[in-house]
């Protein structure tokens, strides 16, 4: 499917005159998404109507829709994760808290990328409600990735590190 600039403008104009809130169109080499909030547009339309200016109303609606139009070029082939990552194990956060790589500011981190860890070894600290919870390794492994910055809030189940079990 080919859309030129004029076709795109006609499509946007027709959608702007309708009650459609979300519109998606995919072709072989593109994806078009239009999302709008009709409540905000109705409020905008009512304030512009008080000026008795239909032309301003149409331009404002067109501008609002144009601001929300995204044309996304999709890759021709689906992206596949590198095969090397398939043998990695995710270490996830067991709670909501703040992630710390070291016991105190200025001290060496518990682990670095490339370190070998053993069962029971502390790999980080999660602070939750002013309590410092040491997170220990559940297996012998090598640290391959550390995905969270020091001092960053984390969610339950968020991946903190990836390891390769030894």
Image (cartoon, grey):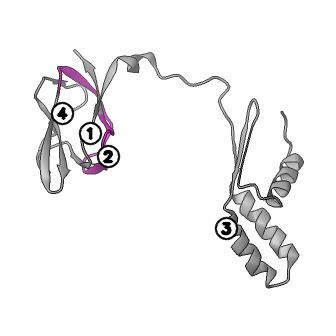
For marks 4 and 3, give the one nearer the viewer. 3
Quarter of the picture holding the N terminus: top right
| Residue identifier under label 3 | 39
Callout 3: helix, strand or loop?
helix
Find residue 142 and report its horizontal and vertical position in percent: 23, 22
CB contact under 8 Å: marks 4 and 1: no
For marks 3 and 1, give the one nearer the viewer. 3
Distance from the alpha carbon under mark 3 to that under mark 2: 33 Å
Distance from the alpha carbon under mark 4 to that under mark 3: 51 Å
| Residue identifier under label 1 | 93
| Residue identifier under label 4 | 111
CB contact under 8 Å: marks 2 and 1: yes
Above-or-below relation of 39 to 93: below
**Image point 25% across, 47% down: which residue?**
150
**Which one is earlier in the sequence, the residue at label 2 or at label 1?**
1
Out of 128 and 121, give the one closest to the viewer. Answer: 128
**Which one is earlier in the sequence, the residue at label 3 or at label 1?**
3
Distance from the alpha carbon under mark 4 to that under mark 1: 16 Å
Stretch in magenta = 138-160
Find residue 162 and report its horizontal and vertical position in percent: 30, 28
């Amino acid at each position: 499917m080919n859309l030129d600039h004029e076709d795109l403008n006609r499509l946007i104009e027709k959608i702007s005159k309708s009650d459609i809130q979300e519109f998606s169109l995919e072709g072989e080499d593109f994806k078009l998404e239009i999302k709008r909030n009709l409540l905000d547009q109705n409020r905008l339309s009512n304030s512009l109507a008080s000026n008795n200016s239909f032309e301003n109303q149409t331009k404002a609606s067109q501008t609002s829709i144009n601001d929300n139009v995204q044309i996304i070029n999709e890759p021709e082939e689906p992206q596949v994760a590198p095969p090397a990552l398939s043998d990695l194990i995710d270490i996830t956060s067991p709670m909501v808290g703040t992630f710390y790589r070291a016991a105190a500011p200025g001290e060496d981190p518990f682990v670095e990328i490339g370190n070998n860890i053993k069962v029971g070894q502390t790999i980080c600290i999660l602070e939750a409600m002013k309590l410092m919870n040491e997170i220990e390794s559940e297996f012998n492994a090598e640290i391959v990735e550390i995905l969270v910055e020091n001092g960053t809030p984390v969610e339950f189940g968020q991946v903190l590190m990836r390891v390769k079990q030894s």
